[in-house]
Image: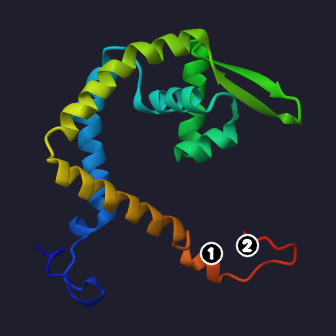
Amino acid sequence: DRWINLKPQGANLEVEDFLSMRFANISALLHRNVTKQYLAQHDIGLPEWRVITMLVRYGSVTTRELRQASGMDKGQMSRALRELEKRKLLERDADATHELRQVLRISAAGNALYRRIMPDARKSQAALLGQLTLAERKALDSALRKLKALAEEAPANEAERKRPARKNGSRKP
């Protein structure tokens, strides 16, 4: 295995060995074969489900705060919010501290949908995790935490970091 016999500077790694590729593939498989199954029963997509879970967890938040917490891009977030608002699963209010900003919160209907989906979601996730031994779950959790910390410490974009700042301090072209 190329991970076990890792050569200096990853010279033996192929694209399919890259962590990002393996995580993306596993994520797609989990979504297609696990998550999509219980979400389809409730006629909701993954982006909308992610927004609902974040609103339940964090309460009233701005769109920016929600996007940062979820890791979703602006377009995906915008489409999910439109769909949820159309279905009356979330509510928007003007932010009293900023005239252009809006505060989002889960509606009663959104909360009810969340309560209907979560037992299935938890059951599916527990079934997957239950296929791993306790030692495997501990090792996976530890490795994921470490990789997350390393990714958070890494420069977001090496080229961006090296680009000289403009007079106003901005790095945008």
Percent from the top left, x then y, of residue 67? 60, 43
Percent from the top left, x then y, of residue 18? 28, 68
Is 127 on the left-hand or right-hand side of 86? left
Quadrant in which the N terminus is drawn: bottom left
* Front position in the image: 126 or 164: 126
- Kindly give the residue lying farthest to the front in the view shown: 134
Q: Is residue 12 above or below residue 50?
A: below
Query: Of the residues shown, which amino acid type is indicated by label 1?
Result: Glu
Residue ID for mark 2: 171
Kindly state the secondary structure of the residue where label 2 is placed. loop
Do the CB atoms of the residues marked 2 and 1 lie less than 8 Å apart?
yes
Query: Which quadrant holds residue 158?
Result: bottom right
**Residue under the point 77% across and 79% down:** 165
Marks 2 and 1 sit apart, C-alpha to C-alpha, by 7 Å
Residue ID for mark 1: 160
**Residue under the point 78% across and 22% down:** 93
Q: Is residue 29 visible?
A: yes
Percent from the top left, x then y, of residue 147? 39, 64
| Residues packed near mark 2 inside 10 Å, few (<14), some (14 to 19) or many (20 plus) | few
Kindly state the secondary structure of the residue where label 1 is placed. helix
- Kindly give the residue lying farthest to the bottom in the view shown: 8
**Residue under the point 57% across and 37% down:** 77
Q: Is residue 23 above or below residue 83?
A: below
Percent from the top left, x then y, of residue 106? 61, 20
Q: Is residue 111 above or below residue 4?
A: above
Q: Is residue 173 visible?
A: no
| Residues packed near mark 1 inside 10 Å, few (<14), some (14 to 19) or many (20 plus) | few
Query: Of the residues shown, which amino acid type is indicated by label 2?
Result: Arg
